[in-house]
Image (tube, rainbow, N blue to C red):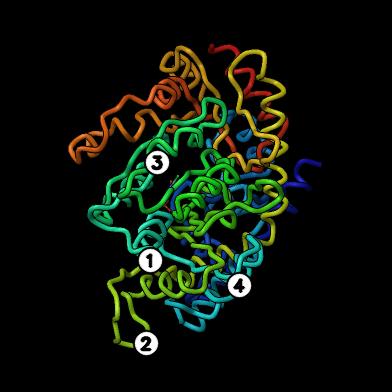
């Protein structure tokens, strides 16, 4: 039975074409297969066969029974298992990637626009502008809003470096605000006190897969006439009051880094807006500030997404709804099993989370991490140092005020393996290992 399921899942090797001259060999068919296998890096692929000749000739060949034994022995858990997803999608990926190799429009090929249309409709906004990463998207958004030297942008102190970094790279000053202790997102009740005449935007982060409190943030922004950029690098697919992340404010920005809820096979990102003027500006900035060929009314960057990444995303979009649902189920299951033992994620009633990270809090984090690593279980810390304490921002003379909630969170958070293909057995296994380590 296991073998049947396994072989149904792993049909994609059949999509490989044979190559080169193989007809002088004793067995051209075997030779073709061996050459196809050699295209893969050592250790990344195995050929399951009972053919004695192949087993002898090919170092990547293994019998199905030996393979099953090997899988059982291998109790290592992946932090994020991109391979399981790729196995499901491999035939479609191969086909779509080949289409790009054939038409050769690697930059801004037709699939880029097709992706933008699909993503805009998924998020429920007028414009999607695909881009080279979820870092470049933040810079493009800030540039489109004309933010630069002398300006301040209010943001959360508890995020990946790119959030504060792009504000500073645009020449503005990041003004870090503390977070809500339950959601880890910016605490809206602290935003107004941080607004000064220099404030030009608010940039909340939707951390770990759950949107920030946009009703409260947009109300403050509206009162002070400020645009809001959502850093939704971790929340693509999440909803807030039934509306999708990245469609909740003036501009939404996301990342398609491979490990994100929707990830490509390299760097990628996208911007979302309903504002025609901002959309035009962001499109131009993405291509060196160009409005028509070799005419540059503004400064820009090379911030395009390449066509190969666009087809990977188009292919993955086909199963994204199922994956988002699976992420929700897995996150809820973890919490059910762990809630009496550690601090589990709090998801606000208006939110659904895509659990880009499933993050708990533990007291003696480094001991716990060490024990888990000895058990063969990977964990990660998102993030050990809040942005206001990062050396780069100290030297940039940002506010040195202590932000207690972010500092405490940074000392306790621990992310567990999380991806939509985790089985119930794996979840139980991870939970058991964690409970034995705290
Ligand atoms: C909150 C946040 N912002 C921005 C980024 C940057 O995205 P990218 O890696 O695509 O540049 C990330 C990625 O890790 C992130 O988590």
Locate residue 13, reporting x and y percent.
62, 61
Q: Say whether residue 14 is visible.
A: no
Circle 4: element type: helix
Viewer-nearest of discs 4 and 2:
2
Q: Mark 1 or mark 2: which comes first in sequence?
A: 1
Residue 292's tag is 2
Q: Which residue is mark 3?
A: 160
Q: CA gap, disc 4 to disc 3?
A: 28 Å
Q: Say whether residue 326 is visible.
A: yes
Q: Which residue is mark 1?
A: 144
**257 relative to 367, above or below:** below
Ligand 1 closer than 8 Å to label 3 CB:
yes
Q: Residues within 10 Å of mark 3 (few under 14, many from 20)?
A: some
Circle 3: element type: loop
Q: CA gap, disc 3 to disc 2?
A: 35 Å
Q: CA gap, disc 3 to disc 1?
A: 22 Å
Q: Residues within 10 Å of mark 1 (few under 14, many from 20)?
A: many
Q: Mark 3 or mark 2: which comes first in sequence?
A: 3
Q: Mark 4 or mark 1: which comes first in sequence?
A: 4
Residue sitting at 59 percent across and 28 percent down? 75
Residue 404's tag is none
Q: Which residue is mark 4?
A: 117
Image quadrant where one finds the N terminus: top right
């Amino acid at each position: 039975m296991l073998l049947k399921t396994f072989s149904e899942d792993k049909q994609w090797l059949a999509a490989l074409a044979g190559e080169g001259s193989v007809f002088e060999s004793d067995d051209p068919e075997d030779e073709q297969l061996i050459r196809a296998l050699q295209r893969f890096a050592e250790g990344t692929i195995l050929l399951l066969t009972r053919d004695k000749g192949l087993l002898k000739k090919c170092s990547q060949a293994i019998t199905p029974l030996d393979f099953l034994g090997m899988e059982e022995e291998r109790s290592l858990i992946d932090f994020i298992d991109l391979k399981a997803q790729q196995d499901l999608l491999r035939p479609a990926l191969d086909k779509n990637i080949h289409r790009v190799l054939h038409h050769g429009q690697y930059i801004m090929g037709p699939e880029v626009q097709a992706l933008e249309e699909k993503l805009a409709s998924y998020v429920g906004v007028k414009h999607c502008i695909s881009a080279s990463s979820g870092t470049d998207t933040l810079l493009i958004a800030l540039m489109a809003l004309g933010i630069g030297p002398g300006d301040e942008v209010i943001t959360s102190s508890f995020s990946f470096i790119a959030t504060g970094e792009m504000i500073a790279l645009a020449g503005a000053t990041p003004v870090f605000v503390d977070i809500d202790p339950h959601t880890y997102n910016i605490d809206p009740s602290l935003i107004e006190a941080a607004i000064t005449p220099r404030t030009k935007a608010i940039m909340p982060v939707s951390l770990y897969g759950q949107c920030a409190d946009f009703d409260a943030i947009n109300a403050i922004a509206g009162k002070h006439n400020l645009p809001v950029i959502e850093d939704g690098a971790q929340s693509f697919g999440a909803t807030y009051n039934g509306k999708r992340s990245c469609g909740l404010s003036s501009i939404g920005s996301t990342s398609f880094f491979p490990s994100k809820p929707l990830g490509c096979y390299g760097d990628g990102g996208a911007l979302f807006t309903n504002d025609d003027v901002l959309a035009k500006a962001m499109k131009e900035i993405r291509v060196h500030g160009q409005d028509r060929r070799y005419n540059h009314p503004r400064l820009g960057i090379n911030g395009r997404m390449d066509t190969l990444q666009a087809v990977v995303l188009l292919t993955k979009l086909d199963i994204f709804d199922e994956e988002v649902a699976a992420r929700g189920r897995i996150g809820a299951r973890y919490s059910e099993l762990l809630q009496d033992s550690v601090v589990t994620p709090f998801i606000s009633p208006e939110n659904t989370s895509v659990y880009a990270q499933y993050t708990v809090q533990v007291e003696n984090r480094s001991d716990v991490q060490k024990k888990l690593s000895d058990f063969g279980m990977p964990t990660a810390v998102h993030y050990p140092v809040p942005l206001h304490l990062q050396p780069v921002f100290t030297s940039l003379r940002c506010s040195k005020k202590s932000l207690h909630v972010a500092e405490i969170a940074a000392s306790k958070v621990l992310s567990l393996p999380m991806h939509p293909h985790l089985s119930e057995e794996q979840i139980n296994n991870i939970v058991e290992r964690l409970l034995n380590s705290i």
